[in-house]
Amino acid sequence: DTGVSQDPRHKITKRGQNVTFRCDPISEHNRLYWYRQTLGQGPEFLTYFQNEAQLEKSRLLSDRFSAERPKGSFSTLEIQRTEQGDSAMYLCASSSYLSGRLNTEAFFGQGTRLTVV
Amino acid sequence: AQRVTQPEKLLSVFKGAPVELKCNYSYSGSPELFWYVQYSRQRLQLLLRHISRESIKGFTADLNKGETSFHLKKPFAQEEDSAMYYCALFMKTSYDKVIFGPGTSLSVIP
């Protein structure tokens, strides 16, 4: 499968623990997005990168959340001191973006389902 | 504030009946709109975008700037159309990004 891959697919953790998720985008894509999706809601934007630069972080992203894309390829999303409200599906997407051109399609991964108990 | 609304959480239609999934947006700039679909146990994928003016799997969507709408339509629903549908808005701001509506679950009854 040469699409966007996310690892792990499922994560159950105790409240207060730290968790880290990984996203491997489509190799030639320079844009990488993180979204969070809870039951009955559409994906909510969290943050995104262009190459290794983190361009924007949503106000939804508290200080406990941090994302990196150190070499402009894969990205990690870390949640520290998890809370029950963090339980959600975390989606990663990537796209190829060139300034001045129309935005191209974002390809999504299968997501990481986090359950905080 | 920029937002995307989809007024129907659930929509049920009979096979062969016309279907329309509503989407309205609020955005002061020039909008670029998409419909994404998520079939059961599959990842979210692009269905169509208004720029392309295309018909995918019999679905079409027309951008109406006056009514700030981008409704998705299909004249004859098929069982395989049952899925979650999300309307999405690409905002060209200083940092452009895509925001999604809450989604509509379409169920096509055989």
Image (cartoon, coloured by chain):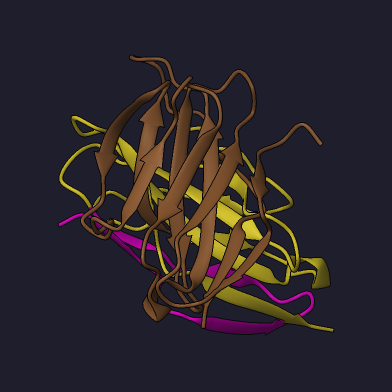
* Displayed quadrant of residue B32: top left
- Whether residue B7 appears in this view of the structure is no
Residue found at x 64% / y 22%? A27
Q: Is residue A85 above or below residue B73?
A: below
Give the colour of chain B. yellow
Q: Return the x and y of residue A98 as percentages of the image width and height.
A: 42, 15
Q: Is residue B39 above or below residue B88?
A: below
Q: Return the x and y of residue A14 as percentages of the image width and height.
A: 51, 77
Residue found at x 55% / y 50%? A21
Q: Return the x and y of residue A9 as percentages of the image width and height.
A: 68, 58
Of the 4 image quadrants, the one containing the N terminus of chain A is top right
Q: Nearer the viewer, residue A4 or A106?
A: A4
- Whether residue A70 appears in this view of the structure is yes
Q: Return the x and y of residue B13 as percentages of the image width and height.
A: 68, 83
Magenta-highlighted residues: B1-26
Q: Is residue A28 above or below residue B43?
A: above
Farthest front residue?
A: A17
- Count of numbered marks: 0
Indicate left or right for B74 with A17 as reference. right
Farthest right residue?
A: B110
Does B63 appear in magenta? no
Give the colour of chain A. brown
Q: Is residue A25 above or below residue B7?
A: above
Q: Nearer the viewer, residue B18 or A68?
A: A68
* Displayed quadrant of residue B98: top left
Does B14 appear in magenta? yes
Indicate left or right for A111 with B101 as reference. right
Indicate left or right for A54 with A102 as reference. left
Residue found at x 74% / y 59%? B42
Residue found at x 77% / y 31%? A2
